[in-house]
Image: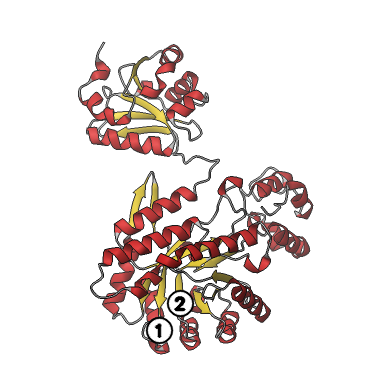
Amino acid sequence: MAKLPGPLEIYPLLPGTNCKVCGEANCMAFATKMAEHTVKLKACTPLYEEQKYAKKLTKLEDLVRPPIREITIGVGDKAVNIGGKLVLYRHDLRYSNPTAFFLDISDNLDSDGLAKRVKEIEDWTYIYIGQNLRLDGIALRGVSKDPKTFANAAKKLIELTEWPIMLCSLDPSMLAAAAMAIAHKRPLLYAATMDTWSEVGEIAVKHGLPLVAHTSGNLNDLATLVTTLRALGVNEIVLDPGTASKAGLGTTVDNFTQLRRSATVADNELFGFPLLSTPISVWADYQDGEAPELTKWDEVLTAASSIVRYSDIVVLHSLDMWTNLPLTFLRSNIYTDPVKPVAVEAGLVEFGEVGPDVPVMYTTNFALTYFTVESDIKQAGVNAYLVVVDTEGMSVQSAVAGRKLTADKVAESLQEYGVADKVNHRILISPGMAARISGETEEATGWTVKVGPQDSSGIPKYLQEGKWKEE
């Protein structure tokens, strides 16, 4: 793992004025957060606004630059940041900037077809434990082979969407025409090759755009291509070492692994850029008569392999729920901070038309626990209050064992949310996994504690049968 700077290395390069503009108490506190990678350098606005700090800013940017450079595609709220990785293994720290999913659109579609495809891409979504799983960008493919058609399609695309765009063609004249049309939207250019690096590199430099460097599996060629592009003045580069499926998938995975290890472990600056994979390439082998489901499955398999082996962008074709849902699940799990559980906000949640006689339950603020309980209460179709206790994102069983869920915390939550003023009874339904603290909870709260089901799937029957009212 590359050596990451500590707070004592960062602090001398900060303004040292303790102005608190960054939101921290002083510059040392900000340096500590920087070393933990929980704040961004840009939060220290005086560094950027005052010329006297210019040299310090340059040194700081070099010091804290991650082994994998961060690159932005697009503009505004919909822009996507890729790269910015600090470590090879997630458990060494955390991963940032989740893998971006770009879905393709052909430039030879008519206006209605283009609009339909854009809407389908933007509308693809799924709610998963409070997260809105979605796609991220659009890859415009130059199927027409005509620069004017490609440029016109790019113009139509930015009228239809604010999402980031990748311009995909190996013909420099195609890229030049489209880049001229939509450069202000900061598209990603795909791609420069060993044959086209000069023309495509000049397009990227002219418009200040990020550029993909593409070779077909030869990492030595890729290193040469990156060196040449940087000498030309291209500093925002995305690496595409080629993506093969089926028999060649092992080689693809090996190449991606070598690139990321070289950058993060060996500190090879030539490969310190985001990685791009093209699972969409499996469709090139599609033949009439072959089941499309098999091709889609190949795409999913290739994409999943790319995601777990460090791909920062994947380019896909299929929009089916069954193909993209497991991929977005996989991405969500990989990019969850391993030391920071996914949590919801603590508080009092109302279900249905609450009144003084409805049951009162409690649970923890671990997202998976909360959303499972929420689903089961809704399934029961009853009116109820649910007290969500702040357990720092731990599940019920873990929180009880770790003393993050205690009788005193439950009592504090009941008081903080004024639950006693909302109901005319003093019966509290405890999660089954918290049965061991039920006696303590009764003493701390003055409420009668009824132990609910061990598994939240038993909540509907428990509430519908009114078992919580039984003596």
Does residue 222 appear anywhere in the picture? Answer: yes
Residue at 37% from the left image edge and 20% from the top image edge: 420
Q: Which mark is on residue 150?
A: 1
Q: Which mark is on residue 167?
A: 2
Apparent side of residue 252 relative to residue 40 in the rendered image (left or right): left
Residue 77 location in percent, x, y?
A: 47, 62
Mark 2 Cα-neighbour bin, 10 Å: few <14, some 14–19, many ≥20: many
Return the residue nearer the eye: 195 or 434: 195
Residue 132 location in percent, x, y?
A: 38, 52
Residue at 25% from the left image edge and 75% from the top image edge: 288
Judged from the image, the secondary structure of the residue bearing numbered disc 1 is: helix
Apparent side of residue 154 relative to residue 97 in the rendered image (left or right): left
The residue under label 2 is which amino acid type?
Leu
Q: Which mark is on residue 310?
A: none
Mark 1 Cα-neighbour bin, 10 Å: few <14, some 14–19, many ≥20: many
Q: In this rendering, is residue 271 above or below 377?
A: below
Does residue 135 appear anywhere in the picture? Answer: no
Q: CA distance from mark 2 to mark 1?
A: 9 Å
The residue under label 1 is which amino acid type?
Phe
The quarter of the picture where residue 289 lies is bottom left
The quarter of the picture where residue 154 lies is bottom left
Q: In this rendering, is residue 298 above or below 112?
A: above
Judged from the image, the secondary structure of the residue bearing numbered disc 2 is: strand
Residue 368 location in percent, x, y?
A: 40, 38
Residue 181 location in percent, x, y?
A: 46, 83
Image quadrant where one finds the C terminus: top left
Number of marks: 2
- Pointer 2 or 1: first along the chain: 1
Q: In this rendering, is residue 221 above or below 173?
A: above
The quarter of the picture where residue 157 lies is bottom left
